[in-house]
């Protein structure tokens, strides 16, 4: 389910980039075993998923994927909200992510959500691709 949802969600970017983005080619079994993959469902159907890595000083979003039938309905923002709540629960001060520079819609969405661009660099796994690094501070005071 994780692989098919991710493949379907990233299909437009696979076409744009001429190759599948890294989340499409990921081996999710170790991530599932580590508890890094969270699934969002709607009416018993998988609507989206988010992959979070917990680090000592931040949460890293590896992937946000929303099934095509659920895109444009707020599920992506819901997953980002959930990641922010999880980051607070972990008492971490920042969420980080990276995306492909050609995924301009994602960069705009993340900026609108409060992420700031922290840099650009060559993708170490895909020659010719550029990674956009982004971060968002998270208030970690006690939740009332």
Image: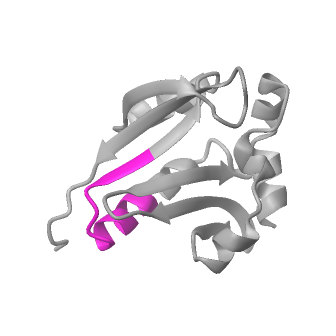
Q: Does the magenta-highlighted stretch encompass residue 144?
A: no
Rendered location of residue 124, percent (x, y):
64, 34
Residue 59 appears in the rendering: yes
Q: Tell me if residue 6 comes above or below residue 33 in the rendering.
A: above
Residue 43 appears in the rendering: no
Residue located 69% across and 60% down the image? 47
Rendered location of residue 52, percent (x, y):
52, 62
* Relative horizontal placement of residue 31, taking residue 52 as reference (left or right): right
Which contiguous range is marked in magenta?
82-96
Q: Tell me if residue 58 comes above or below residue 96 in the rendering.
A: below
Image colouring? one colour
Residue located 73% across and 31% down the image? 126
* Relative horizontal placement of residue 91, taking residue 58 as reference (left or right): left
Q: Which of the 4 image quadrants contains residue 58?
A: bottom left
* Relative horizontal placement of residue 125, taking residue 62 as reference (left or right): right
Quarter that holds the C terminus: bottom left
Q: Tell me if residue 143 comes above or below residue 73 in the rendering.
A: below
3 and 44: which is toward the camera: 3
Rendered location of residue 20, percent (x, y):
81, 38
121 and 12: which is toward the camera: 121
Residue located 63% across and 31% down the image? 123
96 and 143: which is toward the camera: 96
Q: Which of the 4 image quadrants contains residue 104?
A: top right
């Amino acid at each position: 389910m994780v692989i098919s949802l991710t493949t379907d969600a990233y299909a437009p970017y696979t076409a744009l980039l001429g190759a599948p983005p890294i989340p499409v080619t990921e081996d999710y079994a170790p991530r599932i075993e580590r508890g890094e993959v969270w699934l969002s469902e709607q009416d018993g159907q998988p609507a989206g998923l988010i992959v979070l890595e917990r680090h000592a000083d931040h949460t890293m979003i590896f992937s946000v994927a929303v099934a095509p039938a659920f895109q444009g309905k707020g599920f992506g923002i819901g997953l980002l909200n959930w990641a922010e709540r999880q980051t607070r629960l972990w008492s971490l001060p920042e969420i980080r992510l990276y995306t492909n520079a050609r995924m301009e819609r994602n960069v705009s969405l993340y900026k609108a959500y409060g992420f700031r661009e922290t840099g650009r660099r060559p993708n170490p796994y895909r020659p010719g691709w550029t990674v956009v690094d982004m971060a968002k501070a998270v208030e970690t005071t006690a939740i009332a």
